[in-house]
């Protein structure tokens, strides 16, 4: 750890300017980027986010990864490569170990836990990797901020101020998500790029709940623009990122206990959509090769669908998914849903 900190300090000294920290637009980016950006800037860094995923980024990530890993990790490698070419001094890669404190062990996902190690050892010559460790089972969130802030050379007072600003920005972002907005649209509005609400939240012949991890909901290239195709077919689309942890816990109380926190979030989201009557159908998206998600899909089929019998569409994504195929399935799904009497 000391050697890495020395190299970061050295890079900062060589540039004789603020440390340029890159943040890959992948995985946990779509959950916590507003906080990270505000916190890093508050600690005196210049923050550079990689651009939305394009075919070049995805191709670079696919070439850098083993074949059987999920598309979300391949996107992470591609974004890390883009930041390396952009000449950043360091890349922030969070290590999301646990995000909730329970009497039993809880975890996020192996790829989120090992993300810094995968980039550090899978991309030789990459910029310095800054870790932000989240392990709510053992330490509060602010502990990771204190550790990272000290490594960046910020004083305790500055770290505290940066923390408060980060919490405020994250609160604004999550407030937008609560409306049903997809993560990428909420991020654009937070940065002042767009003012009008997205069309898919408006009226529609039917309402569709779109359930997936934030990084699938928020990456139009990876999800093959499914939000656009659902809306074009006549649906009002609501993202599962709208639900709070309290709402997920309410649903989880009636479901089998799970140690995978983000998978519990997916299961609770499907249950919430089905039980509330807010939507006419549910689309469940997952990445090919994701073990925890495959288990949740079976639980949706066996525990939830028989109870409420709401139409359900399952979509498995990888880097080879064709947009035409996703569009056809989205249109067919919306067409089979009964029209609502009131939009």
Image (spheres, helix red, strand yellow):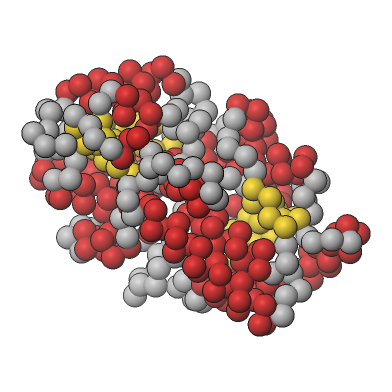
- The quarter of the image holding the C terminus is top left
Q: Residue at x 19, y 29 (%)?
A: 205
Q: Nearer the viewer, residue 74 or 50?
A: 50
Q: Position of residue 203 (x, y in %)?
A: 24, 35
Q: Position of residue 180 (x, y in %)?
A: 32, 47
Q: Nearer the viewer, residue 214 or 295?
A: 214
Q: Residue at x 78, y 60 (%)?
A: 19
- The quarter of the image holding the N terminus is bottom right
Q: Nearer the viewer, residue 295 or 125?
A: 125
Q: Position of residue 316 (x, y in %)?
A: 38, 31
Q: Is residue 308 visible?
A: yes
As drawn, 330 above or below 186: above
Q: Residue at x 31, y 40 (%)?
A: 201
Which residue is situated farthest in the front direction here?
A: 195
Q: Nearer the viewer, residue 181 or 118?
A: 181
As drawn, 4 above or below 137: above
Q: Residue at x 38, y 18 (%)?
A: 325
In the rendered structure, the answer to whether residue 343 lies left or right of residue 244 reads left
As drawn, 105 above or below 288: below
């Amino acid at each position: 750890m000391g050697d890495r900190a020395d190299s970061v300090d050295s890079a900062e000294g060589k540039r004789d300017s603020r440390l340029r920290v890159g943040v890959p637009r992948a995985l946990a980016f779509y959950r916590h980027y507003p906080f990270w950006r505000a916190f890093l800037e508050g600690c005196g860094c210049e923050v550079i986010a990689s651009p939305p995923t394009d075919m070049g980024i995805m191709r670079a990530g696919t070439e850098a990864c083993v074949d059987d890993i999920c598309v979300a990790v391949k996107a992470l490698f591609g974004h890390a490569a883009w930041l390396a070419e952009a000449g950043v001094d360091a890349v922030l890669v969070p290590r999301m170990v646990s995000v909730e404190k329970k009497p039993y062990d809880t975890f996020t996902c192996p790829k989120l836990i090992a993300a810094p190690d995968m980039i550090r050892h899978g991309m030789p010559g990459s910029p310095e990797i800054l870790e932000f460790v989240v392990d709510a089972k053992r330490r509060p969130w602010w502990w990771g901020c204190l550790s990272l802030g000290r490594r960046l050379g910020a004083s305790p007072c500055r770290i505290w101020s940066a923390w408060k600003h980060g919490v405020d920005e994250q609160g604004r972002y999550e407030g937008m998500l609560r409306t049903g907005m997809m993560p990428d649209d909420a991020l654009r509005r937070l940065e002042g790029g767009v003012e009008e609400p997205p069309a898919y939240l408006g009226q529609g012949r039917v309402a569709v709940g779109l359930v997936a991890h934030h990084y699938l909901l928020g990456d139009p290239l990876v999800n093959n623009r499914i939000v656009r195709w659902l809306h074009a077919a006549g649906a009002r689309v609501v993202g599962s990122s709208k639900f709070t942890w309290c709402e997920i816990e309410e649903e989880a109380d009636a479901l089998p206990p799970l140690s995978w926190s983000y998978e519990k979030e997916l299961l609770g989201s499907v249950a919430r959509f089905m039980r509330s009557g807010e939507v006419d159908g549910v689309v469940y998206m997952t990445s090919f090769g994701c073990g925890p998600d495959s288990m949740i899909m079976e639980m949706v089929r066996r525990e939830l669908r028989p109870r409420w019998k709401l139409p359900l569409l399952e979509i498995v994504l990888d880097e080879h998914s064709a947009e035409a195929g996703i569009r056809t399935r989205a249109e067919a799904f919306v067409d089979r849903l009964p029209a609502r009497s009131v939009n």
